[in-house]
Amino acid sequence: MACSFGRFGYFSAFDSAIRIVRGAMFFEYFPQVCTQCVDAFCARACPTGAFQRKGNIVDYNKLRCILCRQCLLACPWGFIYPDIDLQYMIKCDLCGGDPECVRVCFNDAIEYVEVADVSNTKYRGNVARAKGERK
């Protein structure tokens, strides 16, 4: 809900860039957001350049969008979709690097970490396990 409120000023699960998927177990839910692909399929498919990489984020400019939905078809994970009124496409852009969802998560269940930092942490953890060290 923080996502839709931060973007549009109202609470709506339909206008959130985060989709929650129910798992197989009772009370098991998983958030799904844009993976910010390095070679973004949405940006390659967009004929107007409404999707462009800006640093680590694939940004969406709704003023350039002609609602052709090629981005929706190109995204292999289905993380781009039109709003209810079909006025623009919705895609997570990490709120420009300061995600609303992270700010309001009081249990620290969601955190924003740069891709390079995650890779380095996983690498160090794998090296430590290979050496038999405990973290």
Image (spheres, rainbow, N blue to C red):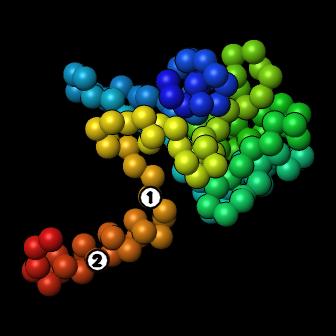
- Residue located beneath label 1 in the image: 113
The residue at 71%/49% (across/down) is: 59
| Image location of residue 24, percent across then percent down | 27, 27
Q: Secondary structure at mark 2?
A: helix
**Picture quarter with the C terminus:** bottom left
Which dot, 2 or 1, sits closer to the camera?
Answer: 1
Q: Toward which corner of the image does residue 14 lie, by quadrant?
A: top right
Look at the picture and state if 86 lies above or below 23: above
The residue at 70%/38% (across/down) is: 73
Q: Toward which corner of the image does residue 64 lie, by quadrant?
A: top right
Q: Mark 2 to mark 1: distance in Å?
A: 16 Å
- Residue located beneath label 2 in the image: 124
Q: Amino acid at mark 2?
A: Arg
Tag count in the figure?
A: 2
| Image location of residue 2, percent across then percent down | 51, 28
The residue at 42%/34% (across/down) is: 104
Please state which of residues 90 and 75 is positioned toward the viewer in this rendering. Answer: 90
The residue at 47%/70% (across/down) is: 116
Residue 27 tag number: none
Look at the picture and state if 127 lies above or below 98: below
Disc 2 + disc 1, Cβ < 8 Å: no
Question: Would residue 55 appear left or right of 23 to someone viewing this image?
Answer: right
**Residue 76 visible to an observer of this rendering:** no
Label 2 vs 1, first from the N-terminus:
1
Please state which of residues 109 and 64 is positioned toward the viewer in this rendering. Answer: 109
